[in-house]
Image (cartoon, grey):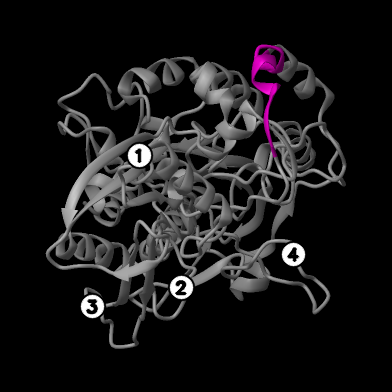
Amino acid sequence: MFKLFFTYILIIIQLARCVPVDLVDEGQELTLDVLHINDIHSYFEETSEDSIRCREPSPQCFGGIARVFTKQKEIRDRSPATTIFLNAGDFYQGTLWYSKFKYEPMTEFGNHLNYTAMGLGNHDFDDKIEGLTPFSDMISFPLLASNINSDESDLVEGKHYYKSTVVEINGTKVGIIGYITQSTRYNFPDGEVAFTDEISSVRREAEKLDAEGVKVIIALGHSGYETDIVLAKQVPLLDLVVGGYSHTFLYTPENEDDKPIDFIQGAYPTYVTSAEGNKVIPVVQAKAYNKYLGHLTLNFDVNGELKLPLESEGVSFAKPYLMDGTVAPDEETLSMMVKWQDRLSDYKKTLGYSEVLLKERGDSEESNIGNVITDSMIAVYEDASIAIMNNGGIRSSIPVGNITGEDIYYVIPYENTINKLVLLGPELRKAIEVAASLLSYTNPNIFPGFGLQFSGAQIDMVVTEENNAGNRIQSFKVKNTDGGFEELEEDLSYWIFFGSCWETKVSERIF
């Protein structure tokens, strides 16, 4: 009897040893709700359809931090344990709220929204290291960027920012990797902070997380829609890319009558097949200025892979919510805003009047507000032949009616400088050819586009399918003293005034 019992125990032990390892280590399925926002640019108050500050809160206005709070809370309350909220950068800079208060309201409202993580954006460095580190010290969420080298500075990895962060959700490790546009180097001309290749940096961090047993990996960053797509193609360990920087509006209409108020630049999400061809990765972005809040519901299998078919089982819900009058502003958040608004009262005084809508337009389009800005430069500096302003420095429009100081800050928030230089005709033509080389043949509206506004010049350009970059200017005429236009002279010198901002540093990119 004893011998039989002992034999029975041995059999059980042997059977236990025969259990496959993959079953022992098997994970569990995960449903994950991802909320995301990008390029807030300190737009705490509501705006019009054209992103003009609303004079008074109204159901006809859009965005506003109080509406975002309401919507994210509604979704988080449904699934608090399995919802994350991601900010893809450029929380700083864009309105008086940042120009006058710097990081202080960003800290208060960032903690109020309780992001899971925030990818650093280029404008978050506009006040250099000393403008970012106090924010980092006081917030309750990590700042991320895997492609920063700050060894020669006071910006400390592991204290002020991280390459990635890992959160555990229902027993599954979810890794979030940050990345930032390399163009951020303009803020550090001495090179004390370096910005390296996004793709290789994210890949290295993804491999590290994967080796540590992280099942789900999200890239969260600020390099633009095109780079987001390349990331999805080149880093197959990723499960989702959440981007910013290019202010791209992605949307998938539900039917023929579903027509959003903004121009659709791609599907939401955009499904990208990896270069290896065996994985499809969703890419998302949510325009800018708190106008939209993105929301995905992702369903992962026990191996941490999105379920198939991807567009129904893997991604069971996907929508950027328009923050319009159907979303009630949160009263507590509105109350928190009052102390800041009261301190801006001096900037609400009337300075002028506009009889027409002065409208900001696309990256490659001429705009009447661009004409106003450049014409004003010529009016002040009469010895200039041409005035140039980069589109990246024009951030809003001005409605018909009174113009206040606050309106002007919305339009030109970056404390632009006016620079004067003299160029020979061939040098000037070559400089503008550099800008023209950024135009896309397939889509002239794609970021960054031509990107310049002019006064005193008429330029005709042709972009061919054969990529004629460097030879796109067909005609370059300059305004003469009689008010007419004459062809650019090869042997003449021209005085140029150009406005540059932190966004593009025209002097570095073009001149």
Q: Earlier in the sequence, mark 2 or mark 3?
A: 2
Q: Secondary structure at mark 4?
A: loop
Q: Earlier in the sequence, mark 1 or mark 4?
A: 1
Q: Of residues 186 and 335, which is closer to you in this image?
A: 186
Q: Earlier in the sequence, mark 2 or mark 1?
A: 1
Q: Residue at x 50, y 37 (%)?
A: 412
Q: Which residue is mark 2?
A: 444
Q: CA distance from mark 1 to mark 4?
A: 32 Å
- In this picture, residue 19 sits left or right of residue 256: left
Q: Which residue is mark 3?
A: 471
Q: Secondary structure at mark 1?
A: loop
Pointer 2 local density, CA inside 10 Å: few below 14, some 14–19, many at least 20? some
- Please name which of the two marks, 2 or 1, marks the residue nearer to the observer: 2
Q: CA distance from mark 2 to mark 1?
A: 30 Å
Disc marking residue 260: 4
* Residue 141 visible from this viewpoint: yes
Q: Whole-percent x and y of residue 435?
A: 31, 62
Amino acid type shown at disc 3: Asn
Q: Residue at x 61, y 76 (%)?
A: 309
Q: State which region is magenta.
A: 340-353
Pointer 3 local density, CA inside 10 Å: few below 14, some 14–19, many at least 20? some
Amino acid type shown at disc 1: Ala
Q: Earlier in the sequence, mark 4 or mark 2?
A: 4
